[in-house]
Image: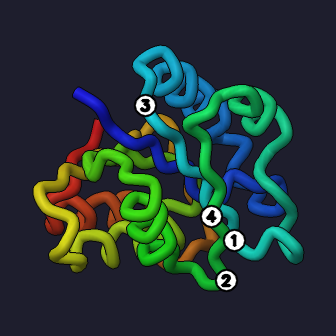
Amino acid sequence: MAYTLVVIDMQPYFTSYIHAIFGVEAAIKRAKKSGCPIIFVEYSPEIYGKTDKKLKSMTEKYSKTFFVKKTQVNGGKEIINAIRKHKLPARIRVCGVETGCCVLNSLKQICDEKSILPKEITLLTKATSNHPLTFVPFDKAISQLKSLGVQTV
């Protein structure tokens, strides 16, 4: 079944990205092999830098790659707008950083959005990471997401 892979804030400025990079690379390979679209979400790239070069190079010739920019920790609206604009599958798989901040807040907003139904959201926990000083600890963020109906694998 088709899905959209959403890669959140895999920018070198966010040092915990290094702990998620191998899982994200694997998720990108699977999405491309399945012909699924990929959305890269970048948090103020003019301040925090662009998505990791290796990840970008993995998709530079892949026509189903989209980039969206967000200017706050919550990128849910930008993800929703990209799904609508490009008519992408509303079934999403999510990876990236920071699990207890940007990932959590973006998914909360997507879960609150009632107009993209039916939807299924899966967090790829082996392709996410959390800095120790992030607002919400990893386990607590996972628990909050599960309570919203987000699946984890």
Instruction: Find residue 43 and name its label.
Output: 1
Classed neighbour count for the residue bearing mark 2: other residues with Cα under 10 Å, few (<14), some (14–19), many (≥20): few
* Cα distance in 3D space between marks 3 and 1: 23 Å
* Cα distance in 3D space between marks 2 and 1: 6 Å
User: Under tag 1, what secondary structure?
Assistant: strand
Tell which tag, 2 or 4, sits nearer the viewer. Answer: 4
Residue drawn 26% across and 63% down? 145
> Which of the marked residues, 2 or 1, is nearer the chain's N terminus?
1
Nearer to the camera, 23 or 61: 61
Instruction: Find residue 68 and name its label.
Output: 4
Q: Which residue is mark 3?
A: 36
Q: Residue furthest top?
A: 33
Residue 81 point in image, percent of width and height = 44, 70
User: Under tag 2, what secondary structure?
Assistant: loop
> Which of the marked residues, 2 or 3, is nearer the chain's N terminus?
3
Tell which tag, 3 or 1, sits nearer the viewer. Answer: 3
Residue 26 point in image, percent of width and height = 55, 23
Q: Amino acid at mark 2?
A: Thr
Q: Is 122 drawn above or below residue 62 in the view shown?
A: below
Q: Which residue is mark 2?
A: 71
Residue drawn 50% across and 72% down? 78
User: Under tag 3, what secondary structure?
Assistant: loop
Q: Amino acid at mark 4?
A: Val
Classed neighbour count for the residue bearing mark 3: other residues with Cα under 10 Å, few (<14), some (14–19), many (≥20): some
Query: In the rendered view of the protein, which quadrant contains the N terminus?
Result: top left
Residue drawn 67% across and 83% down? 71
